[in-house]
Image (cartoon, rainbow, N blue to C red):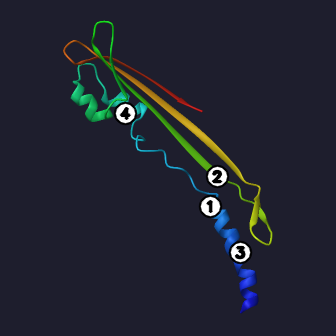
Amino acid sequence: MKRSWNLLLPMILLTLLALAGCQTAPVGPDEKLTVGQVQKEIRVGMSGAEVAQVLGSPNVVTTDELRREVWIYDKIATTSANSGYVGGLLTLVFVIPYGYSSSTTQQTLTVIVKFDEHKKVRDFAYHASRF
């Protein structure tokens, strides 16, 4: 029985390390805000309440030179992926993995909504990037 544990324990440790390398970090609570959503839902003439219902609360609220409100949504999402566990070197205390790789992708979305003096959308713009 003791001999089978000597073989089984390293196998369990290697399996746990391999599974830990396959995790992906969540995008975050603002993942619902997309370019497609802005293009589909936001229209000139909408009220601020309608914009807030679609996009949520803005990150920044400011005014332009004529004291009209401007709402800015600035969202950043980071996704991390770890993979490629090939094997490991078993020492007396722990396993040292090799062949391990990871990658990180960032996405940004900036939406600017400009309101007129009647608090209706007069213009909007957006910029998306991924790197």
What residue appears at the point 61 percent right and 57 percent down from the top-left corner? 22
Tag 1's secondary structure?
Answer: helix
The residues tagged by marks 4 and 1 sit, at their Cα atoms, a distance apart of 34 Å
Where 19 falls versus 4 (above or below)? Answer: above
Which residue is labeled 2 in the image?
Answer: 82
Which residue is labeled 4 in the image?
Answer: 37
Which residue is labeled 1 in the image?
Answer: 20
- Given the image, on which type of amino acid does mark 4 rest? Gln
Q: Which of pointers 1 and 2 lies earlier in the amino acid sequence?
A: 1
Where 64 falls versus 58 (above or below)? Answer: above
Residue 111 found in image quarter: top left
What residue appears at the point 64 percent right and 52 percent down from the top-left corner? 82
Which residue is labeled 3 in the image?
Answer: 11
Tag 4's secondary structure?
Answer: helix
Crowding at dot 2, Cα within 10 Å, few <14 / some 14-19 / many 20+, comes out as some
- Residue 63 picture location, percent across and down: 31, 14
- Quarter placement of the C terminus: top right
Labelled pair 3, 4 in contact (Cβ < 8 Å) = no
- Given the image, on which type of amino acid does mark 2 rest? Asn
Where 106 falls versus 128 (above or below)? Answer: below
Q: Residue furthest left?
A: 118
Left or right: 42 as drawn, with respect to 102: left
Labelled pair 1, 2 in contact (Cβ < 8 Å) = yes
Q: Which of pointers 3 and 4 lies earlier in the amino acid sequence?
A: 3
The residues tagged by marks 1 and 2 sit, at their Cα atoms, a distance apart of 8 Å
Left or right: 21 as drawn, with respect to 75: right
Tag 3's secondary structure?
Answer: helix
